[in-house]
Amino acid sequence: MRVTSLKLTNLRAIEAAEFHFQPGFNLIVGVNGVGKTSVLQALGLCLSAVIKNLNQLRFSGEALALEDIRVGADALTIECGVQIGNAEHHYLIHKRAKPVCRKRRGQACRVSRCTIHPRRQHSWARSPR
């Protein structure tokens, strides 16, 4: 498995950032307070979700708090590209600042705050051939 890309939008101090990783060693450098730790934590969150999906484990996705959303933004988005074998997978985490209420007839309102899902149709457990 190899991380190929990471795209962040409205995560803490980061308004928008995009990283394309090359095979081998990659270095993230910046002055204090620009978001290096946020980048690493977002990458860790995505990779833990990928591993949990590969092993068919449950993933709650509650590692992000509302305070992680950039001040004044409606939502944060983390997109991660991962290469597993010869297949490229993209993973998306989207968290809204305000809960979304989806009501069905005759049912109580459920609140969804964090959506985590693979962007491709196939399962993480099986790579397409």
Image: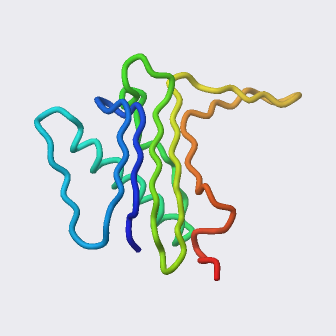
Q: Is residue 81 left or right of residue 110?
A: left
Q: Seen from this angle, which residue lies furthest right?
A: 105
Q: Quadrant of residue 112?
A: top right
Q: Residue at x 51, y 79 (%)?
A: 86
Residue 40 in the image: above or below residue 122: above
Q: Is residue 29 left or right of residue 94?
A: left
The front one of 98 and 11 is 11
Residue 67: x %, y % from top left:
36, 26
Residue 123 in the image: above or below residue 39: below
Q: Residue at x 18, y 58 (%)?
A: 27
Which scheme is used to colour this image of the protein?
rainbow
Residue 31: x %, y % from top left:
11, 37
Q: Quadrant of the C terminus?
A: bottom right
Residue 104 in the image: above or below residue 118: above
Q: Seen from this angle, which residue lies furthest left?
A: 31
Q: Quadrant of residue 115?
A: top right
Q: Quadrant of the N terminus?
A: bottom left
Q: Residue at x 47, y 39 (%)?
A: 77
Residue 36 in the image: above or below residue 16: below
The front one of 72 and 68 is 72
Total marks shown come to: 0
The front one of 66 and 6 is 6
Residue 126: x %, y % from top left:
61, 77
Q: Seen from this angle, which residue lies furthest bottom?
A: 129
